[in-house]
């Protein structure tokens, strides 16, 4: 589904991503792991068009999407979440989800100014669907609460279902459980499983090894912008290079 | 969407209409009417500016200049080219909309202080052009403007103007409520909160910034043109930096991102200097002190006084 070839990004003298190639199969969870500074977030930013690529290409179902802007990618079924929360704090939880549905709603200026029946009908229809998504993560009682007053754990999940509202085929999750406690982490893992049941392909950037090993179909290990190893969780676990570079001498648990 | 529930929107509009209808009974002479009309015209400009600043989070220090420029275009088309007032205002709207759209593309890429600087520059340039193009604009002396005639009806009496402007204000309040309570309004507010978030769900940020900028400039053009017709005279003073700053202060003092805050801010700041004339030399001092005190004790604007009462809108401050 997503194919990356020889992708390179340089920031001055630093090569953050260096000739990286890999392939994400449809309907799988593909994790990208590596030590801090390995270039994982840079990679996500390149795939979603935040950074332009210096070399190499990104293909989505065979079509070249290199340097396509984030908002355009949404219309091609690619959506992302952020390592550092990007939630609209002065909007309610419900409105944050509705924002995800806005791509389907009428934004015609005349219809908007005079609030035609179409606007009202859209609003009602997608409010119902947004409430469904809020129920999925069990926070429908906070629908009318301003996002800035919600807990960090809830907002992390809110960001994921906001992405889900755009009905993507591919979601890139940048550290979805960073800073969460074990029970919240388990809830996010559960949510990711629900997504894969819906046949959504997932690219997961994460430091929580337990979750990565449990969810991933395939793992790419990065270090200093290069691909260090790849394979199934078991293959990666038993790779001595990976253990040396990334995991040290400890164990995963 | 429940945040601005429709019942509150309708009842607030009715209350505003009643206030506007009752006010004339307290206005005993033309002077009061004049203040009221200018205050309502300022309210209309501030409504548009608040959509840009309070909702979409983009500052403009040039809206006085835009209103003045719109007024000049209308005045010149009527005076020198013999257009009818309505056609001239319509033409001014088209010209200013195109001008604002082209301007918005490079300028709204800037953020925060840099955007403030850029709009400040645009406003000053407009003012300089109006001052120096003497053949067209009469230079710093200004120019007289023909009377406002619509389908043979000439607006001459103060109360006629008052009704026109009051109806227009109600119309724009209604339009603003509709814009804010819509997918587009939600997108504008999301751009204010987090451009990354709006981009990640497919919002073409530059497009919506341009749209909101054009809307606010068009509204300023309409009010600026009507002001020119009402006073029968326009000078670069209307397009001055001072006027632009006044409008921004009206937005902030009334309440950022609050529709009725715009009206409160505009009405108070327009009428306050008139009531302070009794203090003569100390007028400016008292005016400034009042603004400072209000901002210290009501950082969310004067409209926040209405919160915590039954006026409060569900969820807004939950």
Image: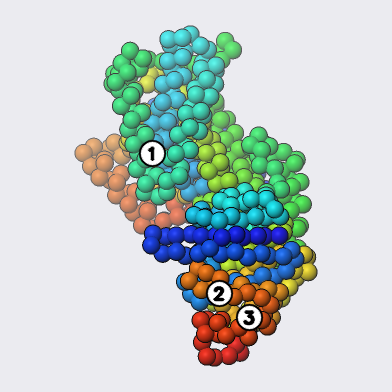
User: What residue do we see at 75% from left, 58% from top?
Assistant: A129
In the displayed image of the protein, which residue is found farthest to the left? B281
Separation (CA) of disc 1 from disc 3: 55 Å
Mark 2 crowdedness (10 Å alpha carbons): few <14, some 14-19, many ≥20:
some
User: What residue do we see at 30% from left, 44% from top?
Assistant: B287
Mark 3 crowdedness (10 Å alpha carbons): few <14, some 14-19, many ≥20:
many
Chain of the residue that carries numbered disc 1 in the rendered image: B
Q: Is residue A50 visible?
A: no
Question: Mark number for residue A25?
Answer: none
Q: Is residue B102 visible?
A: yes
* Residue sitting nearer the eye, B216 or B98: B98
Mark 1 crowdedness (10 Å alpha carbons): few <14, some 14-19, many ≥20:
many
Relative to residue A60, is residue B243 drawn left or right? left
**Secondary structure at numbered mark 2:** strand
Residue carrying label 2: A228
Residue carrying label 3: A236
Relative to residue A2, is residue B221 drawn left or right? left
Q: Quadrant of the C terminus of chain B?
A: bottom right
Q: Position of residue A19 (x, y in %)?
A: 53, 63
Q: Is residue A31 above or below residue A125?
A: below
């Amino acid at each position: 589904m997503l194919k990356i070839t020889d992708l390179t990004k340089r920031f001055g003298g630093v090569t953050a991503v260096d000739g990286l190639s890999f392939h994400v199969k449809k309907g799988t969870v593909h994790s990208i792991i590596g030590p801090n500074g390995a270039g994982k977030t840079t990679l996500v930013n390149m795939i979603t068009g935040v950074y332009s690529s210096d070399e190499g290409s990104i293909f989505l179902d065979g079509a070249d999407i290199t340097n396509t802007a984030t908002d355009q990618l949404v219309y091609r079924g690619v959506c992302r979440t952020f390592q550092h929360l990007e939630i609209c704090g002065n909007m309610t939880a419900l409105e944050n989800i509705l924002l995800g549905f806005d791509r389907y709603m009428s934004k015609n200026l005349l219809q908007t100014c005079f609030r035609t029946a179409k606007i009202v009908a859209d609003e009602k229809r997608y409010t119902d669907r947004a409430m469904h998504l809020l129920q999925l993560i069990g926070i429908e009682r906070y629908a009318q609460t301003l996002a800035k007053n919600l807990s960090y754990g809830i907002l992390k999940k809110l960001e994921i279902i906001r992405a889900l509202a755009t009905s993507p085929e591919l979601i890139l999750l940048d550290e979805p459980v960073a800073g969460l406690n074990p029970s919240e982490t388990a809830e996010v893992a559960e949510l990711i499983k629900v997504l894969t049941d819906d046949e959504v392909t997932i690219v997961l950037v994460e430091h929580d090894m337990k979750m990565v090993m449990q969810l991933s179909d395939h793992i790419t290990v990065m270090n200093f912008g290069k691909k260090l190893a790849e394979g199934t969780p078991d293959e990666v676990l038993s790779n001595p290079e990976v253990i040396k570079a990334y995991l040290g001498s400890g164990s995963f648990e | 969407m429940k945040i601005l529930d429709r019942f509150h929107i309708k009842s607030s509009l009715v209350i505003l209409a009643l206030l506007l209808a009752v006010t004339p009974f307290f206005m005993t002479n033309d002077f009061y009417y004049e203040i009221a009309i200018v205050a309502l015209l300022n309210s209309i400009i501030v409504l548009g500016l608040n959509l840009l600043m309070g909702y979409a989070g983009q500052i403009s220090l040039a809206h006085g200049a835009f209103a003045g420029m719109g007024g000049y275009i209308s005045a010149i088309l009527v005076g020198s080219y013999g257009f009818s007032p309505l056609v001239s205002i319509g033409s001014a709207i088209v010209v200013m909309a195109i001008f604002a759209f082209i301007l918005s593309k490079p300028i709204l890429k800037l953020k925060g202080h840099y955007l403030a600087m850029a709009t400040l520059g645009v406003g000053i340039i407009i003012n300089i052009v109006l001052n120096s193009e003497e053949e067209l604009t009469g230079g710093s002396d200004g120019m007289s403007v023909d009377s406002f005639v619509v389908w043979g009806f000439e607006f001459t009496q103060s109360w006629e103007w008052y009704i026109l402007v009051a109806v227009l204000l109600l119309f724009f309040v209604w339009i603003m409520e509709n814009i804010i309570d819509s997918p587009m309004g939600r997108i504008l507010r999301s751009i204010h909160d987090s451009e990354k978030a709006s981009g990640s769900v497919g919002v073409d940020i530059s497009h919506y910034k341009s749209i909101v900028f054009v809307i606010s400039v068009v509204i300023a053009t309409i009010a600026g043109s009507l002001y020119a017709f009402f006073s029968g005279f326009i000078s670069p003073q209307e397009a001055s930096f001072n006027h632009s700053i006044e409008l921004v202060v009206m937005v902030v003092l009334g309440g950022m991102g609050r529709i009725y805050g715009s009206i409160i801010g505009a009405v108070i700041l327009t009428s306050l200097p008139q009531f302070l004339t009794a203090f003569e030399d100390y007028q400016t001092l008292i005016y400034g002190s009042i603004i400072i005190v209000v901002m210290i004790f009501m950082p969310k604007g004067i409209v926040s006084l209405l919160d915590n009462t039954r006026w409060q809108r569900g969820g807004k401050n939950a």
